[in-house]
Image (spheres, grey):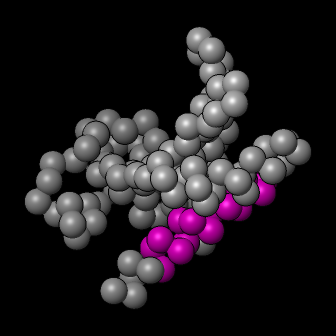
Amino acid sequence: MKFNNQKYTYSKPFSAVQHRWEIVGGKAAIHFNVSLYENDAACGLEFHYFEPPEYMKDEAPSFVNCTIAGGRCWHDGTSLYASETLWPIIKIYLKDGNHDEIFKVLQSEYESKFNYEASK
């Protein structure tokens, strides 16, 4: 799978450090974000679909001008999976400054999500 765009951003608003990784594929854009506090991390994995998935067919777009998807999108995400499954892996790569491996983790998430949906 070829990804059109990969982007990493770092910010420090208020008392938290925020990291965010984005990738754009053929069917959706996804991003993983983490806000780090003293001894806590708040994580999210978000999907920005270019066309509505089956369970959102009757819904209006979540965003009309999504900056990640580059236009309208239907948005869905998970914080539990991001925190419990992805963050322990990403945390290790972030500690080493290995953003290439973090993007590979996200690419794998993207591919498994859309391969799974294609097989339904």
Name the one closer to the observer, 88 or 107. 88
Q: Residue furthest front?
A: 39
User: Would you identify the image quadrant in which residue 116 lies?
Assistant: bottom left
Q: Residue furthest top?
A: 14
Q: Main secondary structure of the magenta part?
A: helix
* In this picture, residue 24 sits left or right of residue 20: left
Q: Is residue 113 visible?
A: yes
Q: Residue at x 21, y 66 (%)?
A: 55
Q: Residue furthest right?
A: 96
Q: Is residue 108 magenta?
A: yes
Quarter of the image with the N terminus is bottom right
Q: Classify 116 as above or below 28.
A: below
Q: Residue at x 47, y 64 (%)?
A: 26
* In this picture, residue 119 sits left or right of residue 106: left
| Image location of residue 7, percent across then percent down | 64, 42
| Image location of residue 40, percent across then percent down | 64, 33
Q: Which residues are magenta?
A: 99-115
| Image location of residue 56, percent across then percent down | 20, 60
Q: Classify 2 as above or below 82.
A: below
User: Would you identify the image quadrant in which residue 4 lies?
Assistant: bottom right
Q: Is residue 11 visible?
A: no
Name the one closer to the observer, 61 or 79. 79
Q: Residue furthest bottom?
A: 119
| Image location of residue 45, percent across then percent down | 50, 50
Quarter of the image with the C terminus is bottom left
Name the one closer to the observer, 16 or 65. 16
